[in-house]
Image (cartoon, rainbow, N blue to C red):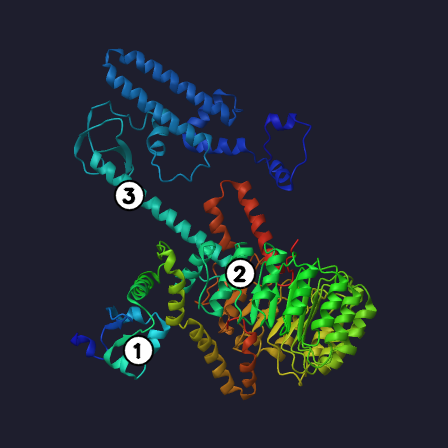
Amino acid sequence: MPRRNNRSSNNEVRGPNSALTAFLQEQGINANTIRERHLQRLRGEEVAEIEEEENGGNSSGVLQGLVADLEERQASREELEEEKDEDVETQEIRIASRRKRRAARRRNLGDDEDNDDLGEYTDSDDADGEYGNTPSTVKRPFQGELTNCVECKAKFKVNVYSKKFIKNGKTGYLCNDCAEEEIRKEKSKRKNEINARKKRKKMAAALLDRQDFKIPTLQDICIKLISKNIDDVEAFGDIGLINMNKIGKILSKNRSLNDKTMTLFLMSNLKELEFWDCSNIDSSSLNKIAAYCPNIEKLSLEMCGQLHNDNLEYFATNLKKLKHISLNGPFLISDSTWQSFFEKIGHNLQSFEIANTHRFLNDSLISLLENCGGENFTHLKLSRLDGLDSKVIYELLPHYLTNLQHLEISYPHKEELIDDAMLINLLSVNGESLEDLILDGCSNLTDNFLITGIKPFCSKLRKLSLGLLDQVTDNGMVQLFTDWDINDGLMYISFRRCISLTDESIAAMLKHSCLTLIELNLNSVNKITSNFWNSGFFQKNYLKLLTVLDLGFVRSCDDKVIEILNKCCPNLKILEVYGNNRCTSNAKIRNGLTVIGRQSDTFSFFNVTSKDEDSRIVTLLNVLDVNNNNNNNNNNNNNST
Amino acid sequence: MSHLDQEDSKYVKLISSDGYQFIVKREACLISGTLKNILNTSFKESETNTVKLYELDAILLSKIIEYLYYNLKYRDELTNIPEFDIPTEMALELLVAADFLDSKYNSRFRQLGSGLDALSKNYPIWGFVYSFSCLNPFIP
């Protein structure tokens, strides 16, 4: 039944609308109707009916409020006239009390969402509505009149502040002591409620951060304190590499890793250095890394948008022992600098990882291959490099690289750049040593490379990530994993958004790797049916080592599936079920297993903070957004710009 | 301190580098991985229930004991855990000390290791899993 008030139907011209607004309008939900409903509830149905008759049935919420107000004011005037002979003092008290009540009610009507200020006690909800509108139930005794307390039956004098109370259906007033007791009870009840909400809120927040909700360790407390006061720290001293890395990560997360704080990490004997957010470190400070720590073997700089040509050249001359370098977002480094860098330092280099720059060109890669290629070079990562736009260059890889252990080629500039033939070629040379293979976003790859590339060559493979390969089908997967005897089993697998895969592929994969599998990502493989989860495979503990499982947007996953996984994976610690709306809090899970992404977890948290339907929906949308980001996080390295 | 002589005494004596003695509940001491290991071996420390901590002075040790009791009191609570107060100037020293006393990293490794241990017994072929432990996200 669509309910529309006059105003909205008269208004023909409107600005742009959100989908939500349009939906709410269609359903006839607006602020007025909500207020009206609330008003009716407040005054009791009887009165509402009478008033509707009087007003011809079309009274809006605002009007009703006005009418009520007027009535009350009139009544008070009459009363005042009657009580002229009473002494002035009591009158004043009376007026004050009425004003207070009216104000309380207005607050109640006006912004009924204002439930948050619970600490304050108002007596509006108990006395006032009934007193104003239904005088028949209980008449408020006069000032100073003697009455019996409903609670303790003692006689006492009623005053303005006496509290109305309903006990066993009998309405009456409380004596001072009982009223205090009652208020205390209510306060503690509210306090408990608030605490429970806080707890739920904290737990929901911790859940999204994938944290257990536990008492912090002394180390963590110290690290937090140090990070907070990092500007006052002069030197770390002997705090250990693990703690230093932890502090580094926290500083990066807080975006407080800057020219000053970064120097704390530089020590002459340092061999490994990781900075997760270099965006606040300027070029001259980056030079300090090479100046202060000449012994660095492994250097990893994320978001290094300020890394200049000069810096990289300085690194090349000063860091004689550099073997591993990983850079994310070094978009100021030009093609010629890359070439001279590889010429100078290439013979030492064992691993090179680069992502997110458009200035790493075809010639840069050729220089890398010519100077570094060979037996020693084991790690290569090329991710999101828009400068590499020649298929021929990619086809050079197998000619130079023969001993790769870790290979990541992800999100190429165009999907045609990486095809089956090139990859099969590369795997035939490197397959024997290859342990990690990450090919996210190379969506031109098909079943062929699985069957003739991975299956015959990759005997040592432990990690396989094929995110977004939509052309890979059941046929290829089943052939790959059936009788793949040269491989003892994979430990990390990601089939994220391989949308063509169905039950068959996953079953074949599990049959092959179930005993070794530690992490599995099946996000958005939405053709998995509920029959799959009910198969006999999940009745036994085959998935002994599985610790992290992502089933986001696999719609067949429901409470029952969670319970099955809970039983059959004894080591499972994190289970993600974003977007599966049939996963609720009803599923029984053991201690130690964290289920992330259920609506029920977040909704209990919405009920606390959101104020009406709209904001609840908006919050939900925000959370879904967060989820999406989470899902993309692994591969979607943040660009530093 | 005659009651400290009994092997299953409820209390343990911790001695700081500058000679101060602290009598602490055994239950609280067991929160620290290092102290737990020391007290559960067959060395002199576990017989006399006395541990000399040459690395820590009294001020640091008293703060650590304060934390142990704090942990003991609040570890099962979910809300209303008060902040543990540390003087800022002590933070770095305390971090080193905490690192020494809490072999949390080891115990985590052991937890996962034991799972693998059981596996490798049943399936000898999975012995290689050890060599790949560096890939495991749960081992820092």
Q: What element carries label 1?
A: helix
Q: Is residue A209 visible?
A: no
Q: Which quarter shows the N terminus of chain A?
A: top right
Question: Nearer the observer, disc 3 or disc 2?
Answer: 2
Which residue, given by chain and number where applicable, does mark 3 sit on? A185
Q: Based on the displayed image, in which of its 4 quarters is residue A272 positioned?
A: bottom right
The x and y percentages for residue A227 are 46, 57
Q: Which amino acid does label 3 sit on?
A: Lys
Residue A224 lies left or right of residue A401; in this view the side is left
Among the two numbered marks 3 and 2 on one chain, the one whose residue lies closer to the N terminus = 3
Alpha carbon separation for disc pair 1 and 3: 48 Å
* Disc 2: CA contacts within 10 A as few (<14), some (14-19) or many (>=20): some
Residue that badge 1 annotates: B39
Of tags 1 and 3, the one toward the viewer is: 1
Give the percent coordinates (x, y) of residue A508.
65, 76
Circles 3 and 2 on the same subunit: yes
Which amino acid, by three-letter code, is at mark 2? Thr
The crowd level at tag 3 (other Cα within 10 Å; few <14, some 14-19, many 20+) is few
- Marks 2/1: CA distance? 40 Å
Residue A199 picture location, percent across and down: 41, 53
Identify the residue position indicated by label 2 in the image.
A263
**Amino acid tagged 1:** Leu
In space, the residues marked 3 and 2 are separated at their CA atoms by 56 Å
Query: Is residue A68 at all visible to an observer of this figure?
Result: yes
Left of A128 or right of it: where is A239? Answer: right
Residue A474 at x, y = what percent? 71, 72
Q: Are marks 2 and 1 on the same chain?
A: no
Please state which of residues A229 and A97 is positioned toward the viewer in this rendering: A229
Q: Is residue A480 above or below residue A244?
A: below
Q: Subunit of mark 1?
A: B
Q: Which of A526 and A470 is in front in this view?
A: A470
Residue A405 position (above or below residue A231): below
